[in-house]
Image (cartoon, grey):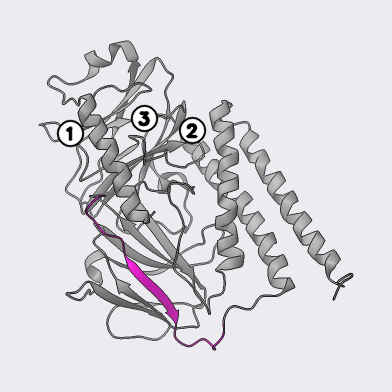
Amino acid sequence: MYGDNPNDEQLRQAWSDFCAQLQAAGETVFRDTAPIGDLDRAKGLRLMARNIALGLQFHLDNNDPACPELLHYFDPLRKQGGDNADALYVGAPVDGAHTYRISGQRGTARYFAVTVLEDGVTPWGGAVVGSLVDDEIDVAEDGSFEIVLSPDEHPGNWIRTTPGAWRVTVRQFFADWVNEAPMDARIDCLDAEAGGPRFDIDTLCQGLDRAANWVRASTTYWADMLDRWQARPNHFLSYRQLDDNAIDATPGGEPLICYWRVPADEALLVRVTPPAARFWSVEFGNYWWETMDYRYRLCSTNCHHAVLEDSGELLLVVAHDDPGVPNWLDPSGHGEGYITVRWIGAAECPTPHCEQVPLGELAAHLPEGVKRIDAQGRRAQLAERRAGAQRRFRY
């Protein structure tokens, strides 16, 4: 019962390699293009630490396509890759040879999409195999739904899988955070053998290795991508304008992304007239491509929450002090980062215009009759954000 196990050396080595990979991954935080401020350095290392759990979820704990579970990716405490402040992402591993059923209550999120993707060269996979979006999904009067994923055709809601099918992701984007309800659903593999996931020493060793590699690769991937926008600050460009790969993207709308740098004595005005759209949103985050803490900070807006000018224009202000306008993007102590605008289901995709001005001259650059917000209104905005996040993530 006691004494040495013949596999002790393999286990010790697996754990040592896991820790060494994570230590090496931390050097990404000190790359030449990364901001050097204390807050940016600290949040970069926090990003690494938080995403260890996500890497383990993907490659050790929920990586058997015969026994998948729909688990959520991001929340207010675990982020990366430009997570949408309006979103709830859940997903599970799949195998293109099997048949799966996703079933439950659809919820009432404004935008709802199910995508199946293949493995690929990016840390998040590759090409999209198929998708069902919003009204493409038949939902019963009581809100229940079923979607089948399989290589063979099925009646009703169905996504054809390919031999390379690797993961299914469900995206829910919430416009009215307080009143829209999240999905309550499960996934079942209909043709898998009975029994739970297999676990042994090899499973552990491979899972630790792949999880640590994923933490490094995913963090580096997104930082490398953002450096491309960093070279052209205050210009909104789509992902496809800078990179042409088959990474899974939100169906129905290509995001426009801008890199910002705003010192304490300056402000950035972003102006655009939103088109008619199924859903649109503005996201705001730091260099590590994670949103600010949207529970407690004004760092995003969308088609429900935004206050438009009488002309229909959306006016956003990035400033370190509250500028007194409804659509404030609060840098939360950061001096640089990204802004993402998504137009989903729109006939046109207007590009926002940026103007950087001295903070003391901000009022002169705002339009005549610009809408304002007082302290009470700001408190109400923030209270609604926290209540909406609690409803979405059920904590």
Question: What residue sits right under mark 2 in the picture?
Answer: 230
Q: Main secondary structure of the magenta part?
A: loop
279 in relation to 361, above or below: below
Q: Please identify the residue farthest to the right as the structure is shown.
A: 3
Which quadrant: the N terminus? bottom right
Q: Disc 1 residue type?
A: Glu
Q: Where is residue 328 in the image (x, y as percent from the top left)?
A: 29, 30
Q: Disc 2 residue type?
A: Gln
369 in relation to 52, above or below: above
Per the image, label 3 sits on a secondary structure element best described as loop
In magenta, the rendered stretch is: 177-195
Place residue 90 in its image quadrant: bottom left
Q: Position of residue 308 (x, y in %)?
A: 16, 35
Q: What residue do we see at 22% from left, 51% from top? A: 346
Q: Confirm whether residue 130 shows in the render.
A: yes
Q: Does the magenta stretch include residue 185?
A: yes
Per the image, label 1 sits on a secondary structure element best described as loop
Q: In this view, does 299 lie to the left or right of 27?
A: left
CA gap between label 3 and label 1 equals: 20 Å
Question: What residue sits right under mark 1 in the picture?
Answer: 313
Q: Position of residue 223 (x, y in %)?
A: 54, 41
Q: Nearer the viewer, mark 3 or mark 2?
A: 3
Q: Please identify the residue farthest to the front as the structure is shown.
A: 1
Question: What residue sits right under mark 3 in the picture?
Answer: 330
Q: Does the magenta stretch include residue 51?
A: no
Per the image, label 2 sits on a secondary structure element best described as helix
Nearest the viewer among 198 and 248 is 198
Q: Confirm whether residue 220 shows in the render.
A: no
